[in-house]
Structures are given as structure tokens and as C-alpha cells.
Image (cartoon, grey):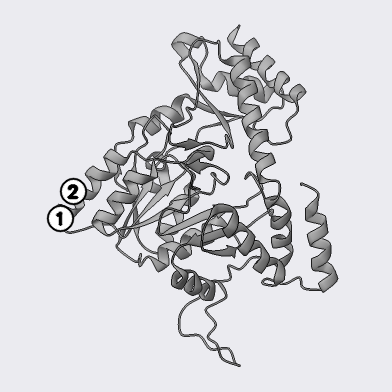
């Protein structure tokens, strides 16, 4: 926590306004929209809820296809299935580890020839780094397909002078406990389309019609954010730049301390923007380093230090085994060789030194 969270929460308790909605929610939406440069923002109970509403309002329904980045967490694809649609997974490129625009172009062209275009593209910005949005945005515009940006991991990053999550038709953010700022649980939906955000706001509040009684003309959801959690979010938003600086310091420490090891490489920073380094990720070439990714992970675990493999691609997940994928070898390779190192904003130099010592001892370097 940054310090101001308690002040805003105290204001909330003093006002006795605890339930979902309220002045803290209104303020959080306005301040978040200003921070990322989006005209409209809607605070919700999770990033998954935001993606679900975005897909629903993009017209996704039973039998439709949605193209999704394969190298991601399952929450990027699950809402597609909620709506009875099917995800098709697009492989990564190696510059940013995000969706490959060339593979997306091929997939869209093939579907256009069959007159079966997907309803949407879900573009994930991975591990605090923006995907190459411009060519993907252009492709979606050319084919008339909604672009939804999953920026759950990329708050504070940049794509040129813009924030990822603000260039597509809709963008989603997450404030889960592991994100760069947190409300413990929560998310945000942003868009340039004010009508869409207004409709999403209605759906998120059980789709109540403006009547003195409870009137419902469409199915709604209980997706609004608590006024208390929004107060925490307002405090967190004020230390976003500090959190980004802390994550980048972690990365710089690891790079200086481990960068000389042959066969150990760091996730690149793409030339089109600035990454937050939300997580510091490495890849390992066992034939050069002498050990594989798993040996390092287990050595850290033995010292009560948690590290995790890079996301297992969606096209390799049992739950999506019947779904189509376009490419997949790059994401599969990154999963096989990739490891996410401890990256919390509160890590001390002593913590980082201890982590590095375990790694160097494991590789004998």
C-alpha cells in the first residue's frame, strides 16, 4: 500500500457509503480514465468481468469465433466460452512475446475468403509489455472486427505515447492482488465509445431499467466495484509510477547480476514502447547454461522462493484442446524454456541478492 489508501477508505467509512457504487467509484473511474488517456471508464469487480462485457457488447454469441493471443492466462479466453463462442489462438512473435501481427493477418485473410470473419480479436499485452498494436489495429479496421485489448498485466506501460488498452474499441485492466496496483479484486473497462460504456454500466448493475420498481428488459450481471475497494484503488493509482519504477529496478538488478551467464536471456523490451517489467522473465538454453528452467525453479523453491514457468499457452491447455490455433511453436518454446522470477514492488536488494545467489549456485556460475 502507498499510504493514501487508508485516507480514502476512512472517508468511505465516515460517509457510511460501503455498498457497490458511490462517490469513490465515480472518482476512481474519472481518475483512471485520465491516467490512461481514455474518454470513458467503468469500474468493475474484475478484469474478467470487463472482458466478458466487452465481448458481449461486441456481439459475440453462440457459434461465433474470437481470435485470442495464445500466450496468456486463461482469463483472456474463458469469457469467450461463457458466451458460447469458440476461441482460436494466435501465436506470439519473439520481439515482445505478444500476438504476431503477420499470423493474425493470415488468419483474417483466410476467414475473409470464406466469408466467416471472427466477431472480435482479444489482444493480450503480456507481462507489462505492449503488443505491436498499430498493425493489429489496422487489420481489425480493414476487416471490420472489434479489437479488445487485454491490458490486465500492462497498466503503466506505453505504446509510443499511448497507453496499451486505449487504442482498440475496448480495453480491460485488472486490479487483482498480483497486479502492479491492486484493489484486492477489481477491474476496469475503458473505451472511446461512450454508448458502449453506458450499456456496460447498465448490464453490470443487473440491467435495471430506469423505473421506480425493479424492471428488467435484458439479462444483467452483478459486476460493479465496491465503494471501499474503489477508495483503495484511488490511493494505489497515485503510486503507479513508483510501482513501475520498482519493477524496472528489479529487472535491472537481475540483468546486471545474471546477464553474463551463457544461455540465460531476458524477455526483450520491444522498440515501440516502454515495458513496466511487471514480471521479470528469463528464458534458458539448457545446452549452454548447463541446467534447464525447471532445475532453477526447483532450486528456488527449495529455498522457499517462488518462481513460476511462463504462461502455458492456451492452445496447449486441456480445456481448449479442441480449439484451433494459428502457429503455436513460439509460445510453446517460451513456455518450455521461460521462467518468471520474483518481481514484487517491495523486494529489497537483500531479497534480490539472495535470489541471484541461488540461481548462480544452481548453474555453477
Disc 1, SS: loop
Question: How many residues crowd mark 2 within 10 Å: few (<14), some (14–19), many (20+)?
Answer: few
Q: Is residue 153 above or below residue 261?
A: below
The numbered disc on residue 110 is 2
The residue furthest front is 161
| Identity of the residue drawn at 62% across and 45% down | 179
Left or right, residue 244 beside residue 93: right
Left or right, residue 247 beside residue 71: right
The residue furthest top is 364
Q: Are marks 1 and 2 in contact (CB under 8 Å)?
A: yes
Which image quadrant for residue 118?
Answer: bottom left
Residue 112 appearing in the image: yes
Disc 2, SS: helix
Q: Position of residue 244 (x, y in %)?
A: 63, 38
Which residue is denoted by mark 1 in the rendering? 114
> Which of 242 and 258 lies nearest the eye of the viewer?
242
The numbered disc on residue 245 is none
> Which of 269 and 305 lies nearest the eye of the viewer?
269
Q: Position of residue 205 (x, y in %)?
A: 57, 75
Amino acid at each position: 500500500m502507498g499510504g493514501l489508501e487508508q485516507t480514502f477508505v476512512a472517508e468511505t467509512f465516515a460517509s457510511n457509503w460501503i455498498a457497490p457504487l458511490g462517490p469513490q467509484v465515480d472518482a476512481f473511474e474519472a481518475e483512471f480514465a485520465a491516467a490512461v488517456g481514455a474518454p470513458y471508464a467503468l469500474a468493475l469487480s474484475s478484469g474478467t468481468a470487463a472482458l466478458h462485457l466487452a465481448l458481449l457488447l461486441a456481439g459475440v454469441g453462440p457459434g461465433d469465433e474470437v481470435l485470442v493471443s495464445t500466450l496468456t492466462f486463461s482469463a483472456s479466453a474463458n469469457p469467450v466460452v461463457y458466451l458460447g463462442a469458440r476461441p482460436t489462438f494466435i501465436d506470439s512473435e519473439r520481439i515482445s512475446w505478444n500476438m504476431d501481427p503477420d499470423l493474425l493477418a493470415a488468419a483474417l485473410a483466410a476467414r475473409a475468403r470464406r466469408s466467416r470473419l471472427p466477431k472480435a480479436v482479444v489482444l493480450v499485452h503480456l507481462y507489462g509489455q505492449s503488443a505491436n498494436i498499430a498493425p493489429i489495429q489496422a487489420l481489425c479496421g480493414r476487416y471490420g472486427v472489434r479489437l479488445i485489448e487485454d491490458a490486465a498485466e500492462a497498466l503503466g506501460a506505453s505504446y509510443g505515447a499511448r497507453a496499451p488498452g486505449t487504442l482498440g474499441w475496448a480495453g480491460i485492466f485488472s486490479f487483482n492482488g498480483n497486479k502492479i496496483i491492486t484493489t484486492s479484486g477489481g477491474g476496469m473497462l475503458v473505451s472511446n465509445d461512450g454508448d458502449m460504456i453506458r450499456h456496460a454500466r447498465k448490464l453490470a448493475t443487473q440491467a435495471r431499467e430506469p423505473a421506480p420498481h425493479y424492471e428488467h428488459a435484458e439479462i444483467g450481471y452483478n459486476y460493479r466495484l465496491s465503494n471501499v475497494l474503489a477508495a483503495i484503488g484511488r490511493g494505489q493509482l497515485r503510486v503507479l509510477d513508483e510501482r513501475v519504477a520498482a519493477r524496472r529496478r528489479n529487472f535491472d538488478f537481475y540483468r546486471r547480476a545474471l546477464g553474463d551467464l551463457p544461455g540465460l536471456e531476458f524477455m526483450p523490451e520491444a522498440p515501440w514502447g516502454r515495458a513496466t517489467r511487471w514480471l521479470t522473465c528469463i528464458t534458458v538454453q539448457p545446452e549452454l547454461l548447463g541446467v534447464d528452467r525447471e532445475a532453477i525453479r526447483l532450486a528456488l523453491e527449495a529455498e522457499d522462493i517462488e518462481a513460476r514457468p511462463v504462461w502455458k499457452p492456451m492452445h496447449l491447455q486441456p480445456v481448449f484442446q479442441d480449439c484451433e490455433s494459428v502457429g503455436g511453436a513460439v509460445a510453446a518454446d517460451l513456455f518450455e524454456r521461460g521462467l518468471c522470477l520474483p518481481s514484487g514492488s517491495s523486494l529489497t536488494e537483500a531479497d534480490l541478492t539472495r535470489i541471484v545467489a541461488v540461481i548462480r549456485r544452481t548453474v555453477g556460475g
